[in-house]
Image: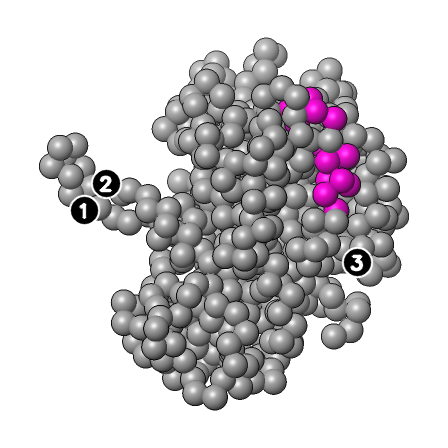
Amino acid sequence: LNEDAWWRSAVIYQVYVRSFADGDGDGTGDLAGVRSRLPYLAELGVDALWFNPWYLSPMKDGGYDVADYRAIHPAFGTLAEAEKLIAEARELGIRTIVDIVPNHVSDQHPWFRAALAGGPERDLFHFRPGRGAHGELPPNDWTSQFGGPAWTRLPDGTWYLHLFAPEQPDLNWAHPAVRQEHEDILRFWFERGVAGVRIDSAALPAKDPRLPDLTEGRAPHPYVDRDELHDVYRSWRRVADEYGGVFVGEVWLPDSERFARYLRPDELHTAFNFAFLSCPWDAVRLRTSIDDTLAEHAPVDAPATWVLCNHDVTRTVTRYGRADTGFDFATKAFGTSTDLALGTRRARAAALLSLALPGAVYVYQGEELGLPEADIPADRIDDPMHFRSGGTDPGRDGCRVPLPWAAEEPYAGFGSREEPWLPQPADWPAYAVDRQLTDPASMLSLYREAIRLRPAFGDAPLTWLPAPDGALAFTRAEGAACVVNLAPTPAELPEHSELLLSSGPLDDAGRLPQDTAAWLRA
Ligand code: TEU
């Protein structure tokens, strides 16, 4: 495959810096921690690292509230250190992707502070008078993604728009200075050697200037997927092309045709495909999801991407381990319980499935360790989603817990001298990297083997093979095939094929048991 097209089939590892590794022992992960673990990432075999926002930030939303897009958060390190990290990773063959947040800034960003002081920077945001006799009601009926109204009132009586937390005021993308600034920010990071940019909330930045009520129900939507965005991303693409940089958009859209409109030779190279996050563990549904994804990408010649989890969703082994327990007469409710052994088996099979599909695969830190979702004690929750939902949503901290590196060390080897910013569950040492490295049956060993063997699938398209009910089988280049069995009946493997890797043991008759995947070569 052409070097320039590395992103078409890359394995991209997502680093949530705050929880990856603590280099200076203060309880928060940092760039020193990442640098010290680069050999681990190289041995895992990943092609690129995507860093969640590592910029200066009051951390009201895990860094998605950016106060300065050109400065590294002091708890993480310095800009010079980031440059070193980018160069050191590149020497190991690993590219870097940074996370740009165009929809909003922190309320501590100099622009918003100047706007609050009454400067012309007000035009860079959405300030409006309220409704009601005394302006005491929000300007419209929009709600925040984290719950509650999307508006906050200032002491002077005006309101400002925030689709997320109040500390994340939305930018006015109709203003030329906003566009100019973001193109400069892209240049700033491409100049520092980054190979790509993730675009946060990529379908949200443009707003209907009338800011109409949602209940007006008029199309197009006043803030989701507006046509103006395509012009913005076309000018971003011209910047990226100067540096050979690539984009991955976080484009949450239910309509696949609207989604594909972002994937153009003159717009975004790729976008996250979140379909597996909501797809049940069912052979027919998975196959349909894969076919739909491939079909929506084919006409625009963009590679598909595959995502099993990220920093916003319940960890994979927990999600796949949720078995509906039916009606519970004690609580008079339909309950769900989590069977982690089942979830882990399925997550292992899902890993082999994703890594065999055509396109790029994202691996979220800890996914390769099979970490479950953690329960966070109420008094330690950090995520604004929890607070803004009035406490009904547990928030996203359960998938953001500091990683276990060494079973025998304090805080499972995360590197902290004091308790890390989020507490680790008591069984975290059992998942530690050092334990898993010496266990050929561990999740980490499976990911390492799978990433090493993945080139066997080449860059050829997928062809489905006949498979028993409840199983999936497909082949790609040079006769490499993947079989996943979701059914209780063991599946026969194709004759005369060599087993490259399986997510669990075969049965005594050499068949593939339930919730197991295998890679084969004819
Ligand atoms: O998420 C965008 C987004 O749409 C979220 O509301 C997402 O649906 C939710 O987190 C799912 O649980 C991005 C980031 O990934 C997220 O971490 C940020 O909080 C958000 O943008 C605001 O920048």
Residue contact between numbered discs 1 and 2, judged by CB atoms under 8 Å:
yes
Residue 506 or residue 191, whichever sits in front: 506
Residue at disc 2, secondary structure: strand
Residue at disc 3, secondary structure: loop
Residue at the image point whose x is 82% and y is 61% from the top: 244
Regarding residue 329, the answer to whether it shows in the image is yes
Residue at the image point whose x is 42% and y is 31% from the top: 375
Residue 156 placement (x, y as % from top left)? 61, 12
User: Which region shows up in magenta?
Assistant: 24-38
Residue at disc 1, secondary structure: strand
Regarding residue 264, the answer to whether it shows in the image is no
Name which of mark 3 and mark 2 comes first in the sequence: 3
Name which of mark 1 and mark 2 comes first in the sequence: 1
Q: Which residue is mark 3?
A: 93
Residue 39 or residue 206, whichever sits in front: 39
Residue 306 or residue 270, whichever sits in front: 306
Q: Which residue is mark 2?
A: 335
Q: Nearer the viewer, mark 1 or mark 3?
A: 3
Is 165 displayed left or right of 267 in the figure?
A: left
Q: Which residue is mark 1?
A: 326
